[in-house]
Image (spheres, rainbow, N blue to C red):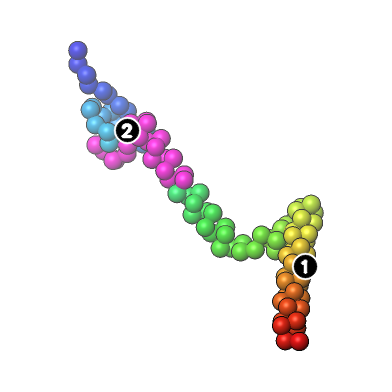
Amino acid sequence: MANKSMIKCANCGLFNTDTKICTNCNTLLNPREKELTLKKEAVKKAEIAKVIYDKENPNFAERLKQHPFFLYKIIGWILYSAFMTISIIGSGLAWFIAMIAAG
Ligand SMILES: [Zn+2]
């Protein structure tokens, strides 16, 4: 039994025999390998997109505050004010402790 596999290249349409890569245009012929390559590329793209997104949007609360949807905007303001309150309390506490230590 001949175990030759004829695979048509999805890119250029050429029929290839017993090869993983198209002899004409170097496209991967094995659908599984092609899928894996596509998945890897997709993961890479998603990672890059995430890094860019994080760089462009450094602050979550600030980002939400500018969100067009009002509910997210409210959440953003709540987060922002909670963060502000905590930092005010924190600095107030630091001042209080410093005063006790000094007095
Ligand atoms: Zn080809």
Bounds of the magenta segment: 23-43
Dots 2, 1 in contact, CB < 8 A: no
Mark 1 lies on a secondary structure that is: helix
- Decide: is 76 above or below 26: below
Q: CA distance from mark 2 to mark 1?
A: 60 Å
Residue hosting label 1: 85
Query: Up-down: is 98 above or below 55?
Result: below
Residue 84 position in % (x across, y down): 75, 68
> In the rendered image, which quarter contains the C terminus?
bottom right
Q: Quadrant of residue 2?
A: top left
On whether residue 85 falls in the magenta region, the answer is no
Judged from this view, the residue extending furthest toward the top is 1
SS assignment at label 2: loop
Query: Does residue 73 appear in the picture of this structure?
Result: no
Question: Which residue is pictured at 45% across the width and 49% down the height?
Answer: 44
Type of amino acid at the residue the image marks with label 2: Leu
Residue pictured at 75% horizontal, 83% vertical: 99
Mark 2 or mark 1: name the one nearer the start of the chain: 2
Dot 1 crowding, Cα within 10 Å, few <14, some 14–19, many 20+? few
Mark 2 CB within 8 Å of ligand 1: yes
The three-letter code of the residue at mark 1 reads Thr
Quickly name the residue at label 2.
29
- Asked whether residue 85 appears in the rendered view, the answer is yes
In the image, 2 versus 85, the foreground residue is 85
Where is residue 32 drawn, in percent x and y? Answer: 37, 31
The foreground one among 17 and 83 is 83
